[in-house]
Structure formats: structure tokens, C-alpha cells
Image (cartoon, rainbow, N blue to C red):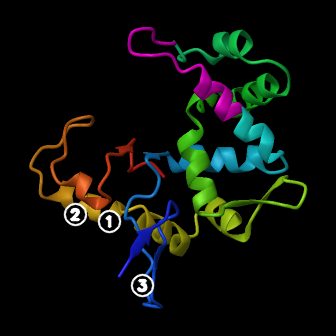
């Protein structure tokens, strides 16, 4: 029997054998703060999808290397230096309307989370709109937040951490990789 795991995590097989859908416990490799996601949801509502993906790609194209790192710490400096036109205006809007708490350089994790959980959906013209799930997330609906936490493997991560007598942020967490078979980053998972 041939079994193939596709990029989106679904499995298919030959010969008509039914396979179950694969679900990773960690789906967002750079897990965002829920507070950042909430701020971005309100800012991305009504924005063209190509503007958002273009901004993320433009930043990614300028990431630098370990030998030649790029400083992204001051958006007031890097935005006018590295972006132009609508992308620069949108990045500045993110930076200023979040009261300097969301650096546009680091929105990719939140963007992946927003899309994988369908908190925003693009219309036929590729303009993002808040979905019912997005509205529930903004309202901190306990059932939805619990569902999202479970999708991302947070209960399992907390079980692992609960066995540690001392855990340090940024320190190695033996066994965490088993949640999905790949490394991931959890930044302040307790912040919602």
C-alpha cells in the first residue's frame, strides 16, 4: 500500500484504503502572543491579502545571515530604510496603531496562526475580512480559545513543563519536539 503525507498534513493512499487525516499537535512554528493576534486581526480586516503577504515576503527577503545580521529592533528606523510605498505605510500602521508593541518584522507567526485557524478569510477580491471565528477570538470566547490551544498542542506542552522542577525560557525542553516532530518556538505562551 502506498501512503503519502501531503504538505497540508492530509494523508492519501492507493488502492482505495481509507486513511485518517494527520493532525500535528503544533501547527504554528512561531507561536504568537494572543494579544498580538488580536491587534493584528483588527488591523488586517479590510486589507488586501497581497499587501500582507508582500510585506512578509519583502521582510523575509532582507533577513540577513548569521555572518551579516540585520537589525530589526527599531521599526521607526528600518521601515523607511527597507520598505517603500504601500508596504511601508502598512508596516508603519501596524507599528503605530499597536502602540509600538507589534514589530511588523515579526508578524509571520501571527499571520500563520490567523490563516490556519481561519480567523480572517479573503473574499473574491482577496480582501481579508473577520470571520465568525475571528470575532469569537476577539471576544476571548473560552470554547474557541480552548480549541485553538488544543490545536497548537498547548495542553501537551504544559503537561511536559509541569514535570519540570525548573524550566527557563529559552532553555532546552527535552521531549517537546515529540509534539510534532519539528522544532518550534513558544513565546510567552501564558500571555493571552
Q: Vertically, is 7 above or below 68?
A: below
Coordinates of residue 182 in the picture (x, y in percent): 32, 50
Q: Vertically, is 4 above or below 174?
A: below
Q: In the image, which residues are magenta?
A: 55-70
- Determine whether, in the image, residue 106 is placed left or right of residue 124: left
CA neighbours of label 1 inside 10 A, class few (<14), some (14 to 19), many (20+)? some
Q: Nearer the viewer, residue 43 or 53?
A: 53
Residue plotted at (68% across, 26% down): 58
Coordinates of residue 145 in the picture (x, y in percent): 51, 66
Residue furthest out toward the left:
165
Residues under labels 2 and 3: Cα distance?
29 Å
Residue plotted at (67% across, 44% down): 40
Whether tag 3 and tag 1 are in contact, CB under 8 A, the answer is no
Residues under labels 3 and 1: Cα distance?
26 Å
Query: Where does the N terminus fall, quadrant-wise?
Result: bottom left
Q: Magenta includes 69? A: yes
- Determine whether, in the image, residue 165 is placed left or right of residue 59: left
Q: Which residue is mark 1?
A: 155
Q: SS of the residue at dot 3?
A: loop
Whether tag 2 and tag 1 are in contact, CB under 8 A, the answer is yes
Q: SS of the residue at dot 1?
A: helix
Q: SS of the residue at dot 2?
A: helix
Q: Which residue is mark 2?
A: 159
Q: Nearer the viewer, residue 138 or 116?
A: 116
Q: Vertically, is 71 above or below 130?
A: above
Say which label, 2 or 3, has the lower sequence index: 3
CA neighbours of label 3 inside 10 A, class few (<14), some (14 to 19), many (20+)? few
Say which label, 3 or 1, has the lower sequence index: 3
Q: Which residue is mark 3?
A: 19
Coordinates of residue 179 in the picture (x, y in percent): 29, 60
Q: Magenta includes 104? A: no
Amino acid at each position: 500500500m502506498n501512503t503519502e503525507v501531503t504538505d497540508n498534513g492530509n494523508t492519501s493512499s492507493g488502492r482505495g484504503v481509507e486513511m485518517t487525516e494527520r493532525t500535528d499537535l503544533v501547527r504554528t512554528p512561531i507561536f504568537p502572543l494572543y494579544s498580538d493576534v488580536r491587534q493584528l486581526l483588527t488591523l488586517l480586516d479590510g486589507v488586501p491579502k497581497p499587501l500582507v503577504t508582500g510585506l512578509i515576503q519583502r521582510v523575509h527577503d532582507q533577513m540577513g545571515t548569521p555572518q551579516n545580521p540585520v537589525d530589526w529592533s527599531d521599526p521607526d528606523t528600518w521601515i523607511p530604510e527597507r520598505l517603500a510605498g504601500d508596504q511601508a505605510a502598512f508596516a508603519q500602521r501596524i507599528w503605530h496603531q499597536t502602540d509600538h508593541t507589534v514589530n511588523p518584522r515579526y508578524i509571520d507567526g501571527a499571520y500563520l496562526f490567523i490563516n490556519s485557524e481561519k480567523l480572517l478569510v479573503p473574499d473574491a477580491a482577496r480582501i481579508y475580512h473577520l470571520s465568525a471565528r475571528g470575532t469569537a477570538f476577539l471576544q476571548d470566547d473560552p470554547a474557541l480559545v480552548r480549541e485553538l490551544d488544543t490545536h497548537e498542542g498547548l495542553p501537551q506542552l504544559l503537561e511536559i513543563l509541569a514535570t519540570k522542577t525548573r524550566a527557563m525560557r529559552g532553555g532546552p525542553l527535552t521531549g517537546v519536539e515529540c509534539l510534532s516532530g519539528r522544532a518550534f518556538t513558544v513565546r510567552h505562551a501564558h500571555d493571552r
